[in-house]
Image (spheres, grey):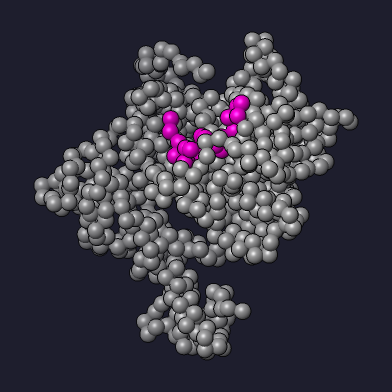
Amino acid sequence: MPISPADILKILEKGARRPLTAREILGHLELPRGERQEAVRLLDELAREGVLVSLKGGRFSLPRKVNLVTGPLSVHPEGYGFVSPGDTREGDVFIPGRFLGEAMHGDRVVARVEPGRLKGKSEGRIIRVLERAHQTVVGRFESGDRFGYVVPADPRLHRDIFIPPASTGEARPGQVVVVRLDSFPGKNRNPEGTVVEVLGDAGDPAVEILTIVHKFSLPHTFPSEVEGELPGVPSQVSPSDYSGREDLRDLVTVTIDGESARDFDDAVAVRRETGGRIRLWVSIADVGHYVPEGSAIDREALERGTSVYFPGRCIPMLPEKLSNGICSLNPGVERLAMTAEIVFDEEGNRLESRFYPSLIRSDARLTYTEVRDMVVAEEARVIEAYSGIYPHLLVMKDLAWRLMEMRRRRGSLDFDLPAAEVVLDLRGRLEDIIRSERNLAHRMVEEFMLAANEAVATFLFGRGVPLLYRIHEAPDLEKMQAFQEFAAHFNYGMVLGREGVASRQLQKLLHEAEGRPEERMLNQVLLRSMKQARYDPDNVGHFGLAAELYCHFTSPIRRYPDLVVHRVLRAVLQQGGMKPGRRAQLQRSLPGTGEVTSQRERRAMEAEREIVDLKKCQHMATRVGEVFDGHISGVTPFGCFVELDDVFVEGLLHVSSLGDDFYHYEEELHRLIGEHRRRVFQIGGAVRVQVARVDLERRQIDFSLEEEGDPLRRRKKMKNRPKKAVKRV
């Protein structure tokens, strides 16, 4: 058996009393002569990755045994940072600004842990950069006396980048540019660079998008290798593709999506059967038929990991010829699909399921609004327009309620917190911020997709094949103990065992809080106590859904893990099942695929949040001085975060602006309390605030407290109130 990283780590963990040379490590391993060179190569690779540290004299050690930590560096805009070791036994290490050295935010570094200035506190000093996170930086170009300089768009890159006169290109002051880093920062010097691209003027909506694209290193153009494969992608389904597929064209099948959707990767059909049973067909675009594994299109899709959705623009995972063309389940045309056919009883329990390649033809492209108008509002005009489909929607409504009730019984959590939706005008500029609607039509589609995902995961798990699961680990016991204590102050109880808490306990607590003043507060605190869902071949279940087995199967146009699941399913369904070679290949590749796609998902979420935060700040910059009602959404030692009730914007009410008392932070109760007046600012509490300041570059909105009884400010609020609201259609 070839040597593995675990073999080396075991020696240095348990068998070494000091750092060892490569020769000494090889002696412990007792390797054949032919494998020694591979072991040395592996040692060097582990050192480059920071799993080991290479010391003077050619010796190797585990970082923590020599007071070192390795990991990504996160820099605060104020200039200090933290290193997050991969070893969960170690906490984040604080790095004072004077000890950052040549490291920049995002770099993978080695830091030496040393006694800090405060008694009992340790801090770190960066001694080596293992891997640079940035070769280019996006920011605003300005001209100085002798040098130009670029102010990075990311405030965590807290040093300006000097641009020599010969390296400014055609950039003009105030424009947004992309800079190639020619030298990195030192203790007493800023980084230097060369302008390689001028994006345009700051404030241009298109430039704002490009700025965030570059800031998060999002691939936004397809390489020539991908373009070279596109001529081989057909524009319509060929009859030769029908072979080996079940023909579902006679089923009444529909897609249900938002008004602005352009690609449709899921279609549904239902049929009521005897004994109160309902049969559901969930047909998903067969992307794998058109995207061979290992092709340039496939490699680029993995690199992107997911489509990224900005207001008014999408950066797709797949080229438009696929995502909006042959793979999109457009109405009235034949499309290839992978179908999950599932039968449910009157209680919403899955009785049987079957999976197969299919040929479908969608009968209609419905919007959430149209479905809501039919199954909720019962509008005769819309029902008449879809008279042939309406009876099927009523069956879907019945099934959705069954599935929702089934998930409720088993303890599935549903955080139905209001979300903001940015409305843009034709020029891409902000028009309004409104509450994002989530009606029964949304819930219907969600329930059907959840059911299909769970059924596929159960089927493949039963076949014992490697799979990329969508997992959501149970929250940490320590965080649940803190939440238990917090909830107890509102007279809510929950039982914690040694293994933590069951999702059913949390669901019961949230149900009891429905409609009460503390409902929003409890939802928010609990949500922040949860871990983030991710992709992993090691199944631990999905805590939030209370599902033992769950994967992503329903969106291969916009999520790479779904494409992986499709390929695994196809391999199992083929004659003879999955081949041993394919099984071995998946066992090797899936851990890395899960890590990459989870990271790409987080990157996309951060980028999407960034543009929404920018639009919110731009909106509030025009409303400085206005007064709003809001509620406290978070509490920290330095103040309260307040979410405005009408415009879905969050800002900071800094503790320094509370001049009526000295306020102390009580972490376990998520509140600030006045030392003398005992005034309390707690999550969920109602407050009235005035917009004091907006920092567009840092995406920060600062509030000041608006006290009752000030008629001048009340008149100003009335005077500045918008004259009309934008009606959503």
What is the quadrant of residue 689 in the picture?
top left
Dividing the picture into quadrants, the one containing residue 94 is bottom left
Classify 545 as above or below 92.
above
Farthest front residue?
A: 240
> Which residue of the protein is positioned furthest toward the top in this rendering?
381
Q: How many marks?
A: 0
Q: Residue furthest left?
A: 145
Report whether 222 appears left or right of 445.
left
Quadrant in the picture for the N terminus: bottom right
Q: Residue at x 38, y 35 (%)?
A: 614
Membership of 316 in magenta stretch: yes
Where is residue 685 shown, x and y percent of the image? 54, 32
Considering depth in this image, is 491 or 452 the residue closer to the camera? Answer: 452
Viewer-nearest residue: 194 or 651: 194
Q: Residue at x 66, y 62 (%)?
A: 583
Q: Identify the residue at horizontal 24%, vertical 49% (top origin).
A: 196
* Residue at position x 25%, y 62% in the image: 186
* Magenta stretch contains residue 346: no
Front residue of 145 and 646? 145
Residue 233, horizontal then vertical, whole percent: 51, 42
- Residue 726 falls left or right of residue 97: right
Q: Percent position (x, y) of residue 120?
A: 45, 65
Q: Which residues are magenta?
A: 312-333
Res. 428 in view = yes
Please state the horizontal and vertical placement of residue 367, each as a whole percent of the image: 59, 24
Q: Is residue 324 above or below residue 122?
A: above
Taking the image as shown, residue 134 lies to the left or right of residue 363, namely left
Question: Which of the 4 image quarters holds residue 190?
Answer: bottom left
